[in-house]
Image (cartoon, rainbow, N blue to C red):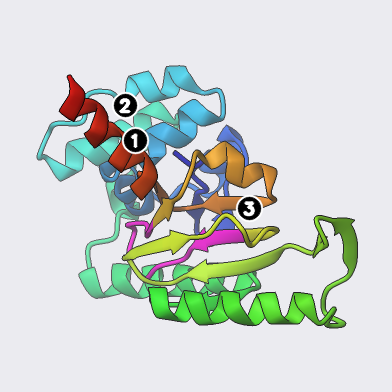
Amino acid sequence: MARITMYLKGKRIEKLEDIKKYFQVYELMDYMNYGALRQWLEDNGYKEYSEKLSIWSSTDQKQKKKKLYDVFGIEYDDATEYTLVDELLLEKRKDKEILNSQIKGECVRSQKDLELLLQNIVKKRDKEDSEFESSGRFGHTNVTKVIKLMSITDYDIPINIPDIRYVGVTASEEFPTVNLEVDEKEYNQQGIFFENVYVKIKMSEKVDQGLRKKRMFL
């Protein structure tokens, strides 16, 4: 599973103090509901905070909010809580627009879009386009290309096109899914990294056929 990258109020969260500084309870609730908040805390060495959030079965929204305030040491004030749904949606849209503008890169919304973009990247690299500079490593460039995955869908990610950073930037709080041919570490060795995505390893046809043969001879 790739490391989760969190944003609150349009700001990238690098450490625990950032959560307190940019605290936004509704965004944190969304991260919590999808399991991303606890994963981020554990990935960044704040396991004790993750354990405090281990009980999250209550359907009482007010209790959930107060739990987040308590865990991160923020004073709870009913007067500061948003009550209008339209206002919340507007705030979320603004934050998403800020996030989208902060990450510079090419946008794709489907597997077909991704394949066309990757073909274009390969062509530019092969022609030693001025946008890329040669590093000599496997004949490819060391300039990392950023690709923003804009839809909650599955994307098949090839391992043979190196030096690419795939970032999930969707309109909702859920993440897109990337299907990998091999373990994520092997992608990282090729300069391929992932942020804000769910990672799934696809079993290759050869491996699958080998397993079937083994089962047949058992």
Please, what secondary structure does the residue beneath circle 2 have?
A: loop
Q: Which residue is mark 1?
A: 68
* 27 in the magenta segment: no
Q: Which residue is mark 2?
A: 53
Mark 1 vs 3, N-terminal side: 1
- Which residue shows up at 40% across the image and 73% down it? 111
Assess disc 2: are there few (<14), some (14-19) or many (≥20) residues with their C-alpha within 10 Å of its C-alpha: some
Q: Is residue 131 above or below residue 71?
A: below
In three-dimensional space, the C-alpha distance between marks 1 and 3, rounded to whole angstroms, equals 34 Å
Please, what secondary structure does the residue beneath circle 3 have?
A: strand
With 115 as the anchor, is 165 left or right in this view? right
Indicate the quadrant containing the C terminus: top left, top right, bottom left or bottom right.
Answer: top left
Q: Residue furthest left?
A: 59
- The answer to which quarter of the image holds residue 166 is bottom right
- The location of residue 83, given as percent across then percent down, is 22, 62
- Which residue shows up at 42% across the image and 61% down it? 156
Residue type at mark 3 is: Ile
Mark 3 vs 2, N-terminal side: 2
Q: Which residue is mark 3?
A: 192
Q: Which residues are magenta?
A: 165-177
- Which residue shows up at 77% across the image and 77% down it? 126
- The location of residue 32, given as percent across then percent down, is 32, 41
